[in-house]
Amino acid sequence: MKRIWDISPPVDEHSAVFPGDTAYSQRAQFVLDANCPVNVNAITLSPHTGAHADAPLHYANGGATAGQLGLEAYLGPCRVIHALDAGPLVRPEHLAHALDGLPQRVLVRTARLASQSWDTFSALAHETLVLLAARGVLLVGIDTPSVDPPSSQDLPSHHVLLAHELRVLENLVLDEIAEGDYELIALPLKLMRADASPVRAVLRDL
């Protein structure tokens, strides 16, 4: 049996979100007791909670929603590349050691321990995304809350995603994942009006 690595953080009331975004909350709608046969909860959360896939609508009015995205980019061979201690931006030279024979999906590990903090984290330089797109990459993932720095207002890396039709996964947990090639499975929900979707991201042995 192929080994499976769960690369998704827990989703609950402790999940960090961008300042001002909707925090996770949950309440009981039905409670299992003598008068009711089931438990049913109502949950409220931002679609950017936990591991998630941004849709083009997130950074372009009129862009595709999460439910309109094709699934091909989110399923298939991928490469995990370590760019530890890269600083605020992961630049092309931080990935250069692992670009030969690149599959169509790349996940970048930047942190030694996963963090959902919005204070400081490594983002992807826009030229890094341009390089990956030129090499035929369809999807890029990262173990931080965003491919752009937390203070960014013009979101250059998100707009490279848009220009090159790259798909993106954010807030992955890659702490225990060695560099190398895997199978990625991280399908977004068919949310027809949403600008992003939570995913349950996993890796398997090829």
Image (tube, rainbow, N blue to C red):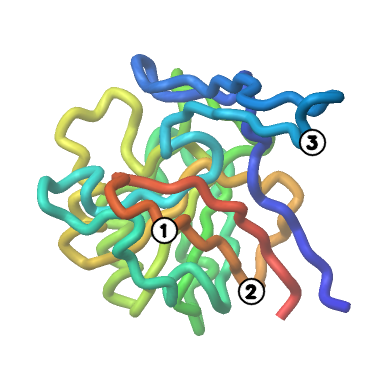
- Going 24% across and 53% down the picture, which residue do you hit? 56
Secondary structure, mark 3, is: loop
Horizontal side of 104 relative to 68 (left or right) equals right
Question: For mark 3, what is the residue?
Answer: 37
- How far across and how far down the image is residue 171, in percent? 52, 41
- How far across and how far down the image is residue 127, in percent? 26, 56
Closer-to-camera residue (22/104): 22
Residue at the outermost bottom position: 101
Q: Using a 10 Å C-alpha cutoff, classify the residue at mark 3 as few (fewer than 14 neighbours), some (14 to 19) or many (20 or more).
A: few
Residue mark closest to the camera, 2 vs 3: 3
Relative to 78, residue 176 above or below: above
- How far across and how far down the image is residue 187, in percent? 51, 62
Q: CA distance from mark 1 to mark 3?
A: 29 Å
Verify CB contact (< 8 Å) between mark 1 and mark 3. Answer: no
Secondary structure, mark 1, is: loop
Q: Using a 10 Å C-alpha cutoff, classify the residue at mark 2 as few (fewer than 14 neighbours), some (14 to 19) or many (20 or more).
A: some
Residue mark closest to the camera, 1 vs 2: 1
Closer-to-camera residue (161/55): 55
Secondary structure, mark 2, is: strand
Closer-to-camera residue (185/179): 185
Question: For mark 1, what is the residue?
Answer: 190
- Going 37% across and 44% down the picture, which residue do you hit? 147
Of the numbered discs 1 and 2, the one sitting upstream in the chain is: 2
Q: Amino acid at mark 3?
A: Pro
Q: Amino acid at mark 1?
A: Lys
Question: For mark 2, what is the residue?
Answer: 183
Q: Amino acid at mark 2?
A: Glu
Verify CB contact (< 8 Å) between mark 1 and mark 2. Answer: no
Q: CA distance from mark 2 to mark 3?
A: 40 Å
